[in-house]
Amino acid sequence: MIGVFDSGIGGVTVLKEILKVLPQQRYIYYSDSIHNPYGDKTDKELYRIVKSIVEYLIDRGCVAVVIACNTASAKCVKRLREEYKTILFIAIEPAYKMVHDYNFEGKTLVLATKGTIESEKFLALYHKYDNHKTILHSCVGLAELIEKNDGKELDVYLKNTLGKYKGVENVVLGCTHYPLIKDKLKKVLGDVQFFDGSVGVAKELKRQLESHKLLKKEDFSLEFIDTSQDKKKEQRFYTLLDQE
């Protein structure tokens, strides 16, 4: 079984890509919306939350855990791998290297939580591939608004906070919630090229499962868990995933 977790339903953008390459598996998706956002948590508090989720997924029989949250990946994955050596941890990260590979000369905007942008892991990635035409923007409160799903409130937020960046070419979506609002982002920023890490995570998960001989064909199943127990979130999750 494969566990996927995020601070809400944003990680559905990662799960969609995983299902394209690994359709015949059993999955648990853990939406920790009661603790959303992760980006404003202290490192100690965040690890306590993440460790609890990981232990639940392991108890349920997960042999691999996908951390579909950039903040949790940046701040927790190293310690998790040290503590749970028999579990595969696949961690997402902002797809800044993709800008280097595909449009290095383009003016770039990185959108992420404050926790992700200030993390040692992201800053190392940024300094390694910096094109010197990059703006780092902490989107305080954006993940919560996407989780809340209030379209009008989102439009106002994006216009007020990101309107000044119109004209950038590349936009790195450094939070798994952000791909859910690509259309709204384009209305504010123009016809930009988006980069996110979901496809890379899906490919890496498959590679790691094959490498460790853990990939077995199974009857597909998917269980959704939300810590707020909000049925509307479950309905939205399956709608976004295009699952009956």
Image: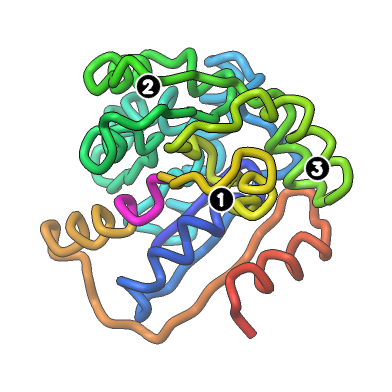
Residue 124 image-quadrant placement: top left
CA gap between label 1 and label 2 equals: 19 Å
Q: Give the label on residue 165, or none.
A: none
CA gap between label 1 and label 3 equals: 15 Å
Choose between 204 and 26: the one closer to the eye.
204
Choose between 104 and 180: the one closer to the eye.
104
Label 1 or label 2, whichever comes before in sequence order? 2
In terms of secondary structure, where does tag 1 sit? Answer: helix
- Which one is in front in this view, the residue at disc 3 or the one at disc 2? 3
* Residues packed near mark 3 inside 10 Å, few (<14), some (14 to 19) or many (20 plus): some
- Which one is in front in this view, the residue at disc 1 or the one at disc 2? 1
Q: Residue at 70% of width from left, 55% of height from top?
A: 226
**Is 197 one of the magenta-colored residues?**
yes
Which span of residues is magenta-colored? 196-201
Q: Residue at 54% of width from left, 38% of height from top?
A: 175
Residue bearing the label numbered 1 = 179
Q: Residue at 68% of width from left, 32% of height from top?
A: 37
Instruction: For the residues labelled 1 and 3, say whether their Cβ atoms are less than 8 Å apart.
Output: no
The number of discs equals: 3
**Residue 107 at x, y = what percent?**
41, 27
Residue 67 horizontal side relative to residue 188, left or right: left
Label 3 or label 2, whichever comes before in sequence order? 2
- Which one is in front in this view, the residue at disc 1 or the one at disc 3? 3
Residue bearing the label numbered 2 = 122
**Residue 173 at x, y = what percent?**
50, 39
What residue type is disc 2 on? Phe
Residue bearing the label numbered 3 = 155
Q: Is the magenta stretch mostly helix, strand or loop?
A: helix
Instruction: For the residues labelled 3 and 2, say whether their Cβ atoms are less than 8 Å apart.
Output: no
Residue 196 image-quadrant placement: top left
**Residue 73 at x, y = what percent?**
42, 33
What residue type is disc 3 on? Asp
